[in-house]
Amino acid sequence: MANQNYNPYDNAKTQFDRVAEMLDLDQATRDLLRQHRQEVHFTIPVKMDDGSTKIFKAFRMIHNDARGPGKGGLRFHPHETADTVRALSMWMTWKCAVVDIPLGGAKGGVICDPRTMSQGEQERLCRGFIRRLHSQVGYNIDVPAPDVMTNGQHMMWMLDEYESITGKRFPGMITGKPVGMGGSLGRTEATGYGVVYCLRECLKNMKIDITKTTASMQGFGNVGEYAARMYVDLGGKLIAISSWDATDKVSYTFRKMEGCNPAELADIKDTFGSIDKNKAQALGYEVLPGSDWLCQDVDILIPAALENQITPEVFPNISKKVKILCEAANGPTTPDCDQLIQDAGIMLIPDFLSNAGGVTCSYFEQVQGNMNYYWSKEEVLEKLESAMTKAFHNVYNLAQEKNLYMRDAAYVVAINRVANAAKIRGWV
Ligand code: NAD
């Protein structure tokens, strides 16, 4: 579960304020970028299989669209909150800007638990979401995508509902569609691979041989699995991975000192990224408490699950051996840890830079959809690698030049780009 003691929106604003101050941004630009351009809060009545009707609460927010239409995922989660969506949409603005794609920041969420809902109930929820929101989304307004506990099937139900209402085909209205239905090859891998492209470049700059490194990861969903696969493919040794167990309602860490095998763990996880503990044990994995992923004696920590996982309370549990904190999840570290990370001499690869591969590939999906011509997987991944490598070095070089903390450097790049777009439009 996400740490309830921290409000991610407060975190996002604290991070923004710090860099706004450094950049000496004028008041109007601060006021514009600190707030959301649009927030929609609504309810979706859904007929459940047992004949009852359940009312689900939903949100869709556009933080900023100065650089292009809103873009951002849609989460289905029982603990979703308006402030989480506010924070995530704000981070989307910075994420699109830091990789320099012409999109703004948006995000949505529905308070629900798809793990306890039938396919029919989920389909009615998705269609209800669009029936209520169709005038506020679209390829030139705001483009949703999958995120925590949503997938290509959910996106297709939403697209179909949208096209039924409008009477036209609009493949660019949503991304994360299945391949063959307007989806891009490489999207499944994009976020996790992008994380490791950044990590690889960072290790090169630090003159560390990736094949001599060890890592520990939290989360083995879409992002975690593909980050794990790429890291291990490049020769790294991943010794621990934690995931949430929906039956026991706790998380577990699965450890193998000789190195986890992401492919075999992928075979024993469910569609929500929960690793089966009995099967893992049978494959020789130690099953440890969920929080143990953080205190492993490794070179690299990769939080790839939820926000607010690394706090000052747990920071002392991090091994002195850790050299890199590579944030794959959104907002996994609370702002009061930033000074601790710097004092400990840990290199940070900030979330909205390292996990920008997903939205970059979503942008490629839109480009391919507009052309109605689809690239090979190799072509997509080549373009992704090039975009992520360029974005990483841009931030890293600025951090080195100006002696900035990596999170601040990423914010400087992103905020400057969005502030300039708002200025050129004449908004501020
Ligand atoms: P997912 O739903 O596919 O997987 C989440 C994983 O986290 C699962 O393995 C789950 O078991 C695990 N988990 C949940 N609670 C946990 C806990 N308390 N301890 C340990 N493990 C726990 O989600 P995802 O798409 O992989 O996204 C993960 C993170 O990355 C989120 O913060 C998301 O917003 C962010 N992100 C995702 C994408 C994307 O393309 N999917 C892009 C950018 C950022």
Image (cartoon, grey):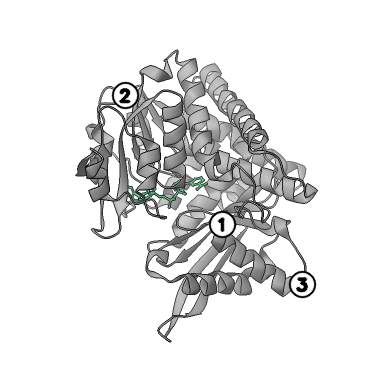
Mark 1 Cα-neighbour bin, 10 Å: few <14, some 14–19, many ≥20: many
| Left or right: 359 as drawn, with respect to 318 | right
Residue at 54% of width from left, 52% of height from top? 89
Disc 1 residue: CB within 8 Å of ligand 1: no
Residue 341 horizontal/vertical position (percent): 35, 29
The residues tagged by marks 1 and 3 sit, at their Cα atoms, a distance apart of 21 Å
Where 150 sits versus 355, above or below?
below
- On-image quarter of the N terminus: bottom left
Where 104 sits versus 108, above or below?
above
The residues tagged by marks 3 and 2 sit, at their Cα atoms, a distance apart of 57 Å
Give amino acid for label 3: Gly
What residue is shown with label 2? 344
Residue 325 horizontal/vertical position (percent): 38, 30
| Left or right: 134 as drawn, with respect to 41 | right
The answer to which of 380 and 180 lies nearer the viewer is 180
Answer with mark 1 or mark 3, whichever residue precedes in sequence. Answer: 1
Residue at 66% of width from left, 68% of height from top? 160
Where 348 sits versus 118, above or below?
above
Mark 3 Cα-neighbour bin, 10 Å: few <14, some 14–19, many ≥20: few
The answer to which of 182 and 417 lies nearer the viewer is 182
What residue is shown with label 1? 152
Give amino acid for label 1: Gly
The answer to which of 336 and 376 lies nearer the viewer is 376
Q: Is mark 1 on a helix, strand or loop?
A: helix
Q: What element carries label 2?
A: loop
What residue is shown with label 3? 167
- Answer with the quarter of the image where residue 337 lies: top left
Residue at 76% of width from left, 72% of height from top? 167
